[in-house]
Amino acid sequence: MTPRRRRIAVLAAGAVAMSTVTGCGAAAGWGGGGGGGGSHTINVLMVNNPQMIDLQKLTDKYFTKKTGIKVNYTVLPEDDLRDKASQEFSAQAGQYDVATLSNFEIPIYAKSGWVAPMNSYLAKDPGFDQQDILPSMRAALSVKGQVYGEPFYGESSFLMYRKDVLAAKGIKMPAKPTWQQVADIAAKVDKRKGMRGICLRGQPGWGQVFAPLTTVVNTFGGTWFTKDWQAKVNAPEFKKATNFYVNLVRKHGESGAAQAGFTECLNDLTQGSVAMWYDATSAAGSLEADGSPVKGKIGYAPAPVVKTKTSGWLYSWAWSIESASSKKSDAWKFISWASGKGYAKQAASKFGWSQVPSGFRRSLYADPHYLKVASSFATPTLNAIKTADPNNPGVQPRPVPGIQFVDIPEFTNLGTEVSQDISSAIAGKMSVDSALNKGQQRAEDVASDYRRRAGK
């Protein structure tokens, strides 16, 4: 059994996983119940994203010096982090007090009792100001009125485009573009001085190609599952959306599209290899950073639509407390600092305002220092996050929440397996219809299990 399949088995059954994890950082003296060798030491399991690494560098100065609480970090790449978290939280070993989880895992873990509710800590910490957290983020990290995660940053998705390139062709980006309008623009600007029309993820993975592609499926009228758990992966709407996406990237997309993910597309737009890119709002900070070749040249438009009013996704890396932790109070103090209203100013003093965690606090979008560097993308980002609706992302009811994913444990395996065939279709190795017919069989296996549980 692969590590990914083990993780799914753990999440679905609540059993103990035996995941294989590489690259784990070591911290001496760790003990049970969040150990760490001292009453004021906590252990934090964290993804290795750049802003998380920035946090690690600021911890001693701004957190430990003030509270006396030492933080031992284990920092892992995203896939390894997910494997390690599923192993740790399902076993409730108590080795970690806090972990970075996303709005995909947190509702699943909460329902299994693996993460601790935070409401009592919030009630005693009015300075944290939970109402300052954007409503869509609060909802995504809560279950039945209980808060189980606090965001470190949040994002939606939008369309990024070279204003100068479109202007040179006499093209004006619509205020609310449709996908057909985007395809038409991509065709017009394609191969201008060697530049391709658009970059779209093609790399296999449920969080790679299917992050943007599932939003396209939603707005074309498709869905992975109906409300009563009927699989619809090879339904006409799903096929139409996927064929559109694959044909667009094959005709006018980036070089090596079948292996291109977020990082590759960011590099392509930054270096002038593509004219447009549909992806995460969090990319804007890098595009507008000092030293970026395209700073000031990028326009930002809402996620393109077809049948829905909006189509942007919703995602957050957030802090959760392991239920088995014996140091929940200290864990909350760490979270209150890391996601608190004052952290942005601390991060900005060291790394600049364009690099601060964003997308989750109202107050940041009223801060003149942040708006000075984020004026071009702050409002589009905020609007995208505010309008994202995980409960109603398409044209029909869904069995569970999720915009760019289906919030069930099985989706990590299902989405990744289907994505591998979609990447093959982008590479010209198989047809979209063949890929989705295979995907339908996999999805039906998942759906039939849920119907059986529901007695249908």
Image (cartoon, grey):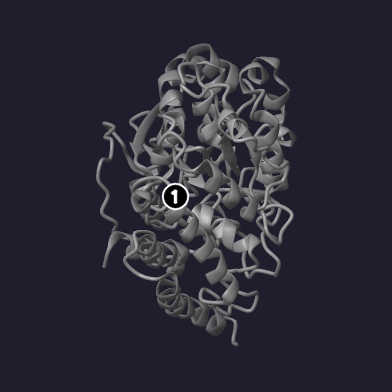
Point out the image quarter for the N terminus: bottom left
Residue 40's quadrant in the figure? top left
Q: Identify the residue position indicated by label 1 in the image.
A: 201
Q: Nearer the viewer, residue 230 or 310?
A: 310
Residue 140: image location, x then y, percent: 63, 50
Residue at the spot 61% in from the left edge and 69% down from the top edge: 222
- Residue 173 in the image: state x and y as whole percent: 67, 39
Residue 147 can be seen, yes or no: yes
User: Where is residue 12, by image quadrant?
Assistant: bottom left
How many marks can you see?
A: 1
Q: Name the element at disc 1.
A: loop
From this view, report whether residue 394 is shown above or below residue 101: below
**Where residue 405 sits in the image (x, y, percent)?**
53, 59
Mark 1 surroundings: few (<14), some (14-19) or many (≥20) residues within 10 A = many
**Where is residue 300 drawn, in percent x and y?**
63, 35
Quadrant for residue 262, please give it.
top left
Q: Is residue 29 left or right of residue 34?
A: left
Residue extending furthest top?
349
User: Label 1 is placed on what type of residue?
Assistant: Arg
Q: In the figure, 306 relative to 439: above or below?
A: above
Would residue 354 appear left or right of 27 to someone viewing this image?
A: right
Considering depth in this image, is 281 or 176 the residue closer to the camera? 176
